Each structure stands twice: as C-alpha cells, then as structure tokens.
Image (spheres, rainbow, N blue to C red):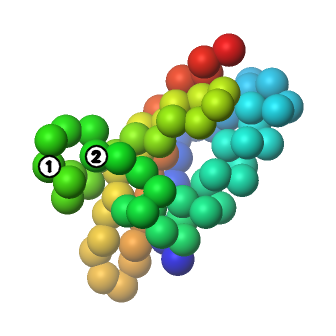
Amino acid sequence: MYLLRYSKAVEAVWDSLPDDARAELDRALVVLCQAPWTHTEPRGDDPNDVERTRALQHTTIALLIAEAPPARHVYLQNIDYLG
C-alpha cells in the first residue's frame, strides 16, 4: 500500500469538484494507492517514469510515485476537472 500525499492547493480543487466527480476520484485513488504502477500511465515515453497520469470520466490527475524505503508514496500533483 502506498501513502497518498497532496498539497493544500490540490485539496482545494478536490473539495470543489462536483459530487459525482469527487466520488469517482475517491474510488480511483483507493485502487491506485494499492497498485499505482498498474493503474496509471507514464507521462513520458519511459514506461518506468515515476511521473504518471490517470484519466477518469470526470477528471485527469497527475501524480508522482516515490519508493524510498521504508515508505512508499503517491504524490497527487494536479487534478483537472473535465466537466
């Protein structure tokens, strides 16, 4: 399991999402924190790129995967609302 981290600015966008978009994002992040490499796409051409994206129906998110033992983190960097 990866720990989720995000800034106050990202939290403000998350909180401002419509209910259906926020619920979809909440469900996706639970799954993503269990296996972020499986449930995201690299932002560049390198499949091992730690900068990743995930497109959902209502939002697109940008994140960074950090594996520095003993902790593993997913840093949610940006949320774009598509509505």
Residue at the far left in the pictured view: 46
Taking the spot 65% from the left edge, 61% from the top edge, the residue there is: 30
Residue 12 appears in the picture as rendered: no
Q: Which residue is mark 2?
A: 42
* Badge 2 density bin: few <14, some 14–19, many ≥20, Cα 10 Å: some
Q: Residue 57's x, y, as percent? A: 64, 31
Q: Is residue 82 shown left or right of residue 50?
A: right
Residue at the far top in the pictured view: 83
36 and 2: which is toward the camera: 36
Taking the spot 54% from the left edge, 65% from the top edge, the residue there is: 33
Taking the spot 51% from the left edge, 36% from the top edge, the residue there is: 55
Residue 77 falls in which quadrant of the image? top left
Q: Is residue 9 above or below residue 70?
A: above
Q: Residue 53's x, y, as percent? A: 40, 41
Q: Residue 82's x, y, as percent? A: 60, 18
Q: Are marks 2 and 1 in contact (CB under 8 Å)?
A: yes
Residue type of the residue flagged with mark 2: Pro
